Image (cartoon, helix red, strand yellow):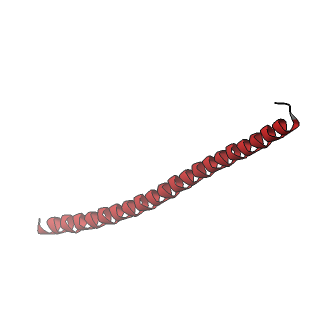
Amino acid sequence: MAENLREKIVETNRDVKWICRTLAEMKDRDAEMEGRLRALENWKSETAGEEKRERQIAAGAGGVVGGIVAVVVKVMGWG
């Protein structure tokens, strides 16, 4: 019976070590995945920021062109 108990203790110890290694690997994978998600979120927010800047530039350019057209129309006496 003592031999059987010793075998169970050794087996349990082995299982506990395996579980600890597996949990550590899972933590590492979770940390890696979290890093990837953060990078993706940062990229997405940068892309959204660039699109917003492009829209603002286009709106500004449209306003400048509209202002020039208004001046030309006024100078030509059409408006």
**Would you say 58 lies left or right of 1 here?**
right
**Would you say 73 lies left or right of 51 here?**
right
- Residue 76: name its quadrant: top right
Point out the image quarter for the C terminus: top right
- Give the farthest residue toward the top: 79
Q: Which one is nearer the viewer's eye here, 31 or 59?
A: 59
- Give the farthest residue toward the left: 1
Rendered residue at 52%/56% (across/down): 42
Rendered residue at 46%/60% (across/down): 35
Point out the image quarter for the N terminus: bottom left
Where is residue 18 shown, x and y percent of the image? Answer: 32, 64
Rendered residue at 20%/67% (across/down): 7
Q: Which one is nearer the viewer's eye here, 77 or 2?
A: 77
User: In the picture shown, does residue 46 fall above or below 10?
Assistant: above
Where is residue 55 shown, x and y percent of the image? Answer: 66, 45
Where is residue 77 shown, x and y percent of the image? Answer: 86, 33
Rendered residue at 46%/57% (across/down): 33
Q: Which one is nearer the viewer's eye here, 48 or 21?
A: 48
